[in-house]
Image: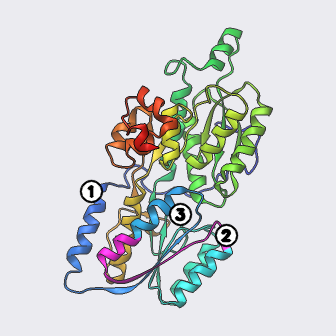
């Protein structure tokens, strides 16, 4: 069992496991089937009602760039007579409670809730049920919700941990200077890594940690320290990684960062410490900045989650609930009917196929002037400098 030698905000070990880690993945085809069911079964009656979307924070780019607009568009398309309410809590528990209460007062029939704090959010679920509203837990599980739409975050953590282990295997990537130096010195110590997890209040963070530990078990990787980053803050990640790079000078061979925002903070710390190249660093969310760091060689990989698919699935589900239907789900999480979607690991060799060909970002969006040379070296074709300038 791998155990950290130092670090703050230790990882809780008692998290409940979700059923069917691999078997419960919802494919794009299944999501499309849900969409078709909505359109067909509701043809005889046009529903009306009010749906509220409550998102937790804005530091993660996907929420405002993808989740919110996609959700609003799909609900409006599937349910022209429905009203959509929206609020972002800015990582403030009390604000989210007030936002939820306001939506319920304004007549929300369904709340789609991405909780700032999943324990505190149980109160929102209870109040919604008292007023006859349904709650769809979105991205983060909340006890007592009527439905849950998310990704399998333990599997996601396993993907990140496996990718990092592969990057640190000398047989796979022999260019790691520190490992070569240790071998030359005759030391048998394995590669050292930092685990920079997400917020301790987020159950997805704990699931990611569990998956990452499972992937690293049985390897010779030495977890130097582990940390749960408050509020998923890139700045706090930078501060902690800077301190660890000082404490474990010359020993950090890799960094498991639990999100692309956290990865950005970790990469900033590594660069400030003069590490060149930056130790292999993971991430997740498929943010544009992370894709650019991967192209430049500053981030090893990310996990792409089709957040538009997740938002569309939650919107379709909300419309079906408004219609009074009993939507089909693919799994059960602690008694709550669940739809889980499949994530995708993306490294430098996957960007063109997954990101560009998948219409996540265009080559022009990725290959801005600062990244143009790196893009050309990797065979990505962007617009001209004049077009981009």
Marks 3/1: CA distance? 23 Å
Asked whether residue 79 is drawn in magenta, I would say: yes
What residue is shown at x 66% (from left), y 72% (from top)?
93
Whole-percent x, y for residue 273 in the image: 73, 31
The magenta stretch spans residue 316: no
Classify 238 as above or below 151.
above
- Sequence-wise first label, 2 or 1: 1
Q: What residue is drawn where x is 58% and y is 84%?
A: 101
Q: Residue furthest right?
A: 247
- Per the image, the residue denoted by label 3 is 140
Q: Pinpoint residue 306: horizontal percent, then vertical percent.
A: 40, 54
Q: How many marks?
A: 3
| Circle 1 Cα neighbour tier, 10 Å, few/some/many (<14 / 14–19 / ≥20) | few
Report which residue position mark 2 lands on: 92
247 over 89 or under it: above or below: above
Viewer-proximal residue among 165 and 2: 165
Q: Dot 3 surroundings within 10 Å: few (below 14), some, or many (20 or more)?
A: many
Q: Which residues are magenta?
A: 72-93
Looking at the image, residue 86 sits to the left or right of residue 330; the answer is: right
Residue 362 is situated, as x and y percent measured from the top left of the image, at: 37, 45
Q: For numbered disc 3, what is the local secondary structure?
A: loop
Q: Residue at x 23, y 74 (%)?
A: 39
Marks 2 and 1 in Cβ contact (< 8 Å) = no
- Residue at image position (60%, 47%) is 209
In the drawing, what numbered circle is on residue 29?
A: 1
Q: Secondary structure at mark 1?
A: helix
Quadrant assignment for the N terminus: top right
């Amino acid at each position: 069992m791998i155990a950290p030698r130092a670090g703050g905000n230790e990882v809780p070990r008692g998290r409940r496991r979700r059923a069917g880690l691999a078997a419960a993945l919802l494919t794009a085809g299944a999501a499309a089937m849900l969409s078709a069911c909505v359109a067909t079964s509701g043809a005889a009656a046009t529903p009306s009602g009010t749906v509220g979307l409550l998102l937790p924070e804005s530091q993660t780019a996907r929420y405002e760039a993808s989740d919110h607009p996609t959700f609003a568009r799909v609900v409006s398309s599937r349910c022209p007579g429905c009203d959509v309410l929206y609020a972002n809590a800015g990582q403030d528990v009390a604000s989210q409670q007030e936002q939820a209460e306001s939506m319920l007062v304004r007549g929300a029939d369904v709340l789609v809730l991405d909780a700032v704090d999943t324990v505190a959010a149980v109160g929102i679920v209870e109040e919604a049920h008292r007023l006859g509203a349904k709650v769809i837990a979105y991205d983060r599980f909340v006890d007592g919700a009527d439905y849950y739409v998310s990704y399998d975050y333990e599997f996601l953590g396993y993907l990140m941990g496996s990718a990092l282990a592969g990057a640190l295997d000398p047989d796979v990537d022999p260019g790691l200077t520190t490992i070569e130096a240790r071998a030359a010195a005759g030391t048998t110590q394995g590669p050292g890594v930092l685990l920079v997890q997400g917020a301790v209040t987020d159950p997805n963070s704990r699931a990611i940690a569990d998956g990452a530990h499972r992937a690293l078990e049985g390897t010779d990787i030495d977890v130097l320290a582990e940390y749960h980053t408050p509020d998923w803050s890139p700045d706090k990640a930078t501060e902690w990684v800077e301190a660890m790079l000082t404490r474990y000078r010359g020993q950090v061979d890799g960094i498991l960062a639990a999100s692309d925002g956290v990865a950005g903070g970790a990469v900033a710390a590594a660069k400030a410490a003069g590490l060149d190249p930056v130790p292999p660093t993971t991430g997740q969310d498929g943010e544009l900045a992370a894709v650019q760091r991967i192209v430049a060689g500053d981030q090893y990989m990310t996990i792409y989650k089709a957040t538009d698919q997740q938002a569309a699935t939650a919107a379709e589900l909300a419309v079906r609930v408004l219609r009074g239907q009993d939507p089909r789900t693919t799994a059960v999480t602690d008694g709550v009917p669940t739809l889980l979607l499949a994530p995708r690991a993306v490294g430098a060799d996957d960007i063109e196929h997954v990101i560009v060909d998948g219409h996540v970002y265009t080559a022009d969006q990725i290959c801005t002037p600062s990244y143009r040379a790196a893009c050309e070296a990797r065979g990505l074709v962007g617009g001209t400098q004049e077009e981009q300038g």
